[in-house]
Image: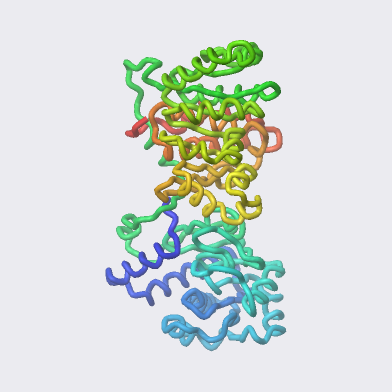
Amino acid sequence: MKLFCRDEMQRLEMAAVAAGVPLAQLMENAGRALAQEVLCRCRPVKGKRAVVLCGRGNNGGDGFVCARVLAQQGMECVVILAQGAPRTDLAGEAFAALPEGVRVLSGEDREAARREMEGAGVLIDCVFGFSFRGELSGLPAQLLGFANGVPCLKVSADLPSGVECDTGRVSAGAFRADVTVTFTGKKPANASYPGKEFCGETVVRQVGVPAALVEGAETHIFETDAGFPPACFSTPDPQANKGDNGKLLMVCGSWGMAGACVMAAQAALRCGVGLLQIAVEERLYPLIAQAVPQAVYIILDWENRREESEERLFEALRGCTACLVGCGLGTDSERLCPLVFSHCQRPLVADADAVNFLSRHPGFLEGIQAPVVLTPHPGEMARLCDDTIPEIQSDRLGAARQKAKDTGAVVALKGAATVVAAPDGRCAVNPTGNPGMAKGGSGDVLAGMAGAFLAQGMRAFEAAVLAVYLHGYAGDRCAERLGQRAMLPTDLVEALPQVFQAFPAGEGAL
């Protein structure tokens, strides 16, 4: 599903005008759509008061139309001018069309505005919409702050005021909506945290932009949907052998963290990789081989056979179709990551301790010519970017996109609504998954899945997007069956067969 940034939405509206749809009609339809959503959620409307906070731009115009329609349907309506009189011609015309029964207050009369909001059955936010940037201040900030404390239904037009469209960044005091009615298509902030939290439930309503224009509009950000996995898979060749299904090399696991390697390996196997090789220290081999008997092992003995171990690793790197490095490596990353990063010429997934290694030695990433997928959680991303976790989380989209641009790697910033960014500017926001997945080991499962898809020939961005979506989908199935509290990362692996049954092969490339 396309997510429309601010400039993209403005271009789309101008294209609609050029196609013969007046802006006034778009505003009328938007206001009516907003009113209809309120009416559906507030029945019976008799005796209920709707308070509409309106800005001075066209988002305020949507609010004036909404107030008019609600009043015509029998609701008591109050309009509060949060920024004074309307400043655009369209908003002015909509304001002039308000019926006499709609009371209009200046937000400057704070006490009167407070009284009206306290008695509201629904508060409707039409102050800024998708045009907002920066920080809330002045009268709008005061009114929105008070509105947030009123215990009633809260509805926003397009985006809650104080939420930035393109980034999902949220200003202090932003309006917290129960429902956001967004027009024509979702915006990035409707799908990505922290903005998504302030949107509540997002409802998309069409307001007159021709469907052909929406379908043909170019966007750089999308929300992955259920149509993506079938498009990635093709029907298996009946003559295929294990070599045709990819050879994944895993350089993972260390003393005390063998489980990370095991979970990544099991996930990779469940995702269809033809041959799995695991490079491990000799003392780990009995532990991991018992849990993953399907793999072929490259035994490394750094104390007694250093040169031989290096050559075994280099040979495996030359022979694989993709490599996964980092899961459970611990301090061994200082020995193994330089060898992998300097010799790997195949698509590479760098997870966990490999990401931490790169944060300490960023120069190694610059020397890699093959496609790279980085899978940091917010803490690892903060180290990678030399930022704080709150800074990363305040603009997850921006952080992932900038790091992808700077490094040339695909970056999958994990967390609620995982963001996958490509160096060319494409970005996917993931809708699947739940808090029950926030447990040690879930990331190892994801890394194994991404590595398997890369090994089977999928391009780096598509492999990461697919792995993230199916990983979250598996988590949702586990939550339904086991509950979020009880589910384990290993349950995600066990759910993968059912996940693939839910997404049969289409006409894809994998």
Residue 101, x across and y down, in percent:
56, 86
* Location of residue 169 in the rendering, given as x and y in whole percent from the top left corner: 58, 60
Q: Is residue 371 above or below residue 95?
A: above
Taking 438 as reference, is 95 above or below it? below
Which residue extends farthest left? 19
Can you name the residue that lies furthest to the front here?
307
Residue at the image position 58 percent from the left and 71 percent from the top: 124
Q: Is residue 25 left or right of residue 385?
A: left
Which residue is at a point 56% across and 67% down the rendered structure image? 156
> In x, y percent, where is residue 254?
65, 23
Residue 209, percent from left and from top: 35, 65
User: Height in image: 293 above or below 41?
Assistant: above
Which residue is found at the position 49% from the left and 50% from the top? Answer: 401
Q: Is residue 229 visible?
A: no
In the figure, residue 509 lies in which quadrant?
top left
- Check the picture and name the quadrant holding the C terminus: top left
| Type of colouring | rainbow
Q: Is residue 189 above or below residue 162?
A: above
Of residue 38 and residue 45, the one placed in the foreground of this image is 38
Q: Is residue 395 left or right of residue 500?
A: right
